[in-house]
């Protein structure tokens, strides 16, 4: 029992160290890019030794993937929670868009990380494959929402769900990209209503 009690603070310290390393890496990757970032720079920013780094991560690449996958899983969980069983399809589209855009606004470092990730994927086949897996999870969230809408008679039954999900993601991510490049012209909160109307008109079962 004493050993177990003593282990709890140690585990908490380890997790705190891990989170500080991830937070430092996020800022450095966003500021300098993946290729230019170094383990030395990350540990110096976090205030730890390289030994502490390698307790938690095998390499810079391992940390990069850990950081991305944790943040993406958090987002996908938020997206799933934004879909309410029993709500209308249009309400769920609005909830999903709101969740996506809220997370984008709350995490100012995320856009730069996404751009860096896409550039890294363009140079590395293994990264592209893992990137494809992440997008497949994202499509699954949309497909599940569309399938529930079909079961409730709210979504057209003559559409290819996988294609519709991919098209919706492209539309949403295109809007987000434009908001990063022209933030004064494309304000995400102001895009929710027109995007909701566009997606609903394309996918809803006619009354």
Image (spheres, rainbow, N blue to C red):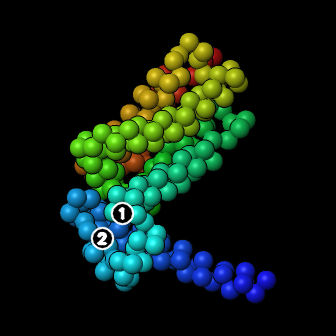
Which residue appears at 35% of the width and 77% of the height? 50
Which circle's residue, 1 or 2, is located before the other in the chain?
A: 2
Does 40 appear above or below 79? below
Task: Using a 10 Å C-alpha cutoff, classify the residue at mark 2 as few (fewer than 14 neighbours), some (14 to 19) or many (20 or more).
Answer: some
Of the 4 image quadrants, the one containing the N terminus is bottom right
| Residue 39 coordinates in the image, percent (x, y) | 30, 70
Disc on res. 39: 2
Viewer-closest of 163 and 25: 25
Looking at the image, residue 92 sits to the left or right of residue 176; the answer is right
Which residue appears at 59% of the width and 78% of the height? 12
Kindly tell me whether residue 27 is visible in this rendering.
yes
Kindly state the secondary structure of the residue where label 1 is placed. Answer: loop
Which residue appears at 28% of the width and 52% of the height? 116
Kindly tell me whether residue 82 is visible in this rendering.
no
Looking at the image, residue 40 sits to the left or right of residue 192; the answer is left
Does 131 appear above or below 113? above
**Label 1 to label 2: alpha-carbon separation:** 8 Å
Of the 4 image quadrants, the one containing the C terminus is top right
Viewer-closest of 188 and 15: 15
Choose top left, top right, bottom left or bottom right for residue 124.
top left
Q: Name the residue under label 1.
A: 59
| Residue 77 coordinates in the image, percent (x, y) | 58, 49
| Residue 163 coordinates in the image, percent (x, y) | 46, 23
| Residue 151 coordinates in the image, percent (x, y) | 70, 23
Does 136 appear above or below 64? above
Kindly state the secondary structure of the residue where label 2 is placed. Answer: helix
Viewer-closest of 32 and 126: 126
Q: Are marks 1 and 2 in contact (CB under 8 Å)?
A: yes
Disc on res. 144: none
């Amino acid at each position: 029992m004493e050993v177990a009690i003593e282990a709890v603070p140690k585990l908490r310290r380890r997790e705190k160290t891990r989170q500080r390393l991830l937070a430092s890496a996020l800022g450095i990757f966003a500021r300098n890019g993946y290729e230019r970032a170094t383990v030395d720079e990350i540990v110096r920013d976090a205030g730890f030794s390289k030994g502490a780094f390698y307790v938690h991560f095998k390499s810079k690449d391992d940390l990069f993937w850990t950081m991305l996958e944790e943040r993406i899983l958090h987002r996908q969980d938020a997206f799933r929670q934004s879909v309410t069983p029993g709500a209308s399809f249009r309400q769920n589209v609005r909830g999903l868009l709101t969740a996506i855009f809220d997370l984008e606004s709350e995490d100012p470092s995320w856009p730069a990380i996404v751009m860096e990730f896409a550039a890294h994927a363009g140079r590395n086949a293994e990264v592209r494959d893992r990137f494809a897996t992440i997008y497949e999870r994202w499509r699954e969230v949309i497909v599940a929402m569309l399938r529930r809408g079909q079961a409730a008679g709210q979504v057209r039954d003559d559409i290819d769900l996988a294609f519709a999900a991919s098209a919706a993601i492209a539309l949403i991510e295109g809007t987000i990209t434009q908001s990063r490049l022209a933030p004064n012209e494309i304000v995400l909160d102001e895009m929710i209503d027109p995007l909701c109307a566009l997606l609903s008109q394309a996918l809803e079962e006619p009354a």
